[in-house]
Image (cartoon, rainbow, N blue to C red):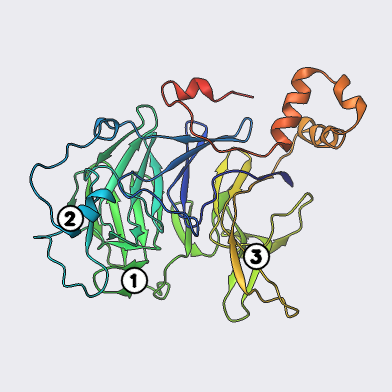
Amino acid sequence: MWTIAIEGGPRRVNHAAVELHGFIWSFGGYCSGERQSRDRPIDIHVLNPANYRWTPIEAQNEELLVPKERAIGPMSFEQEVFERAGLAMLGDGEWDGEGPPILQSTLPAHVPYPRYGHTVCAFGGKAYLWGGRNDDYGASHLLHQFDPETLKWTLVSTSGYPPPARDGHTAVVSGHRMYVFGGFEEELQRFSQDTYSFDFLTKTWSKLTTSGHPPIWRDFHTAVAINDKMYIYGGRRVYENKMFVFGGYQGTLNKHFNDLYSYDPESGVWAMLRPAGQFPCERRRQCTVVVDDKVYLFGGTMPVGVTIDNSATGLADLDDLHVFDFKPTLRTLCLLKVCTLRDTPEFKLLPRELRKDCENVCRANEVAMSTVDGWFRQLPAG
């Protein structure tokens, strides 16, 4: 059942999210028309599932908390422009004036720059971010670890044969290994159908020799792990060993979807679901995370300017949050009913805590920066 529909969260596309310690952590992505500071790290937003409130979080690496010292000495015109933009030039700083200049992030290497098309996986209570690209800096091949308790990034020192830099790939964790498939390789400018694994215990990358019939070359697909198997599809989440697929886009028809399907790998059966509640609008590039018996879906792009043949002439980025509850409790069902009374005189007669719960369910988010120190204490539990 679709239970929650709230707007006002981070407006993001091609972001990546993971559940850590009961909270949902969303990393990066982009919003059309939004200019991100190039000397800032990848942005982080945290959702508290208890009250559906988003909180922006600042990474706490020491290098990010003090201003950078400016180099002493004269600078060329190009260097001055880059300095003011928070960028550094590669090589000797020469630029022939043809095409965009080659830029390099001024962030320390262990702090990931803003990006999209990356993946984030959880292992041992920490988030592992790999790959992704930025239109200024290109794609990355580095593996970053984020600690939600210290709010600090570290660069994982690895060995072996890592995947080339790319974006639009997928990654899943099974046991103590992360498996990476597909994506678009930066250096060779090609779509990939290779499979790599990373062993969290030995910090070793391996390129796998596979057999059978692998998926054809692709990017921006999705993948899930079910019973130690990796499934590649347009789906996104697993619940009770079933894969659930929501929405997406069909390029031939130029049509977006908001339908919901389930796939049971044991029986090999697909089923179209028709749950109650308010469906999210048609979309693609959204992000979903499972926590307990709920799926949290947020962001993505929706079609605008839909013509008479149901095709779209444009896209709009979304900032909404939707919750799909596999096992809605009686309390949840009653709360949804009570929320319909918010504009009546009787609503004011309800207990304060119940009115507060209704506000959390109905009130739009207002994403604003908050003090980071002790942020766990600032996220109310209800």
Say which amino acid is labelled 2.
Gln
> Which label was assigned to residue 270?
3
Q: Is residue 325 visible?
A: no
Secondary structure at badge 2 equals helix
Say which amino acid is labelled 1.
Ser
Q: Looking at this rendering, what residue extends furthest in the right direction?
A: 345
Q: Nearer the viewer, mark 1 or mark 2?
A: 2
Q: Which residue is mark 2?
A: 79
The residue positioned 50% from the left and 55% from the top of the image is 31
Q: Is residue 195 visible?
A: yes
Sequence-wise, which precedes: disc 1 or disc 2? 2
Sequence-wise, which precedes: disc 2 or disc 3? 2
Left or right: 238 in relation to 136: right
- C-alpha span from label 1 to label 3: 27 Å
Q: Which residue is mark 1?
A: 192
- C-alpha span from label 2 to label 3: 57 Å
The residue positioned 28% from the left and 32% from the top of the image is 61
Secondary structure at badge 3 equals strand
Left or right: 299 in relation to 196: right
How far across and down, in percent of the image, does residue 266 sit?
58, 58
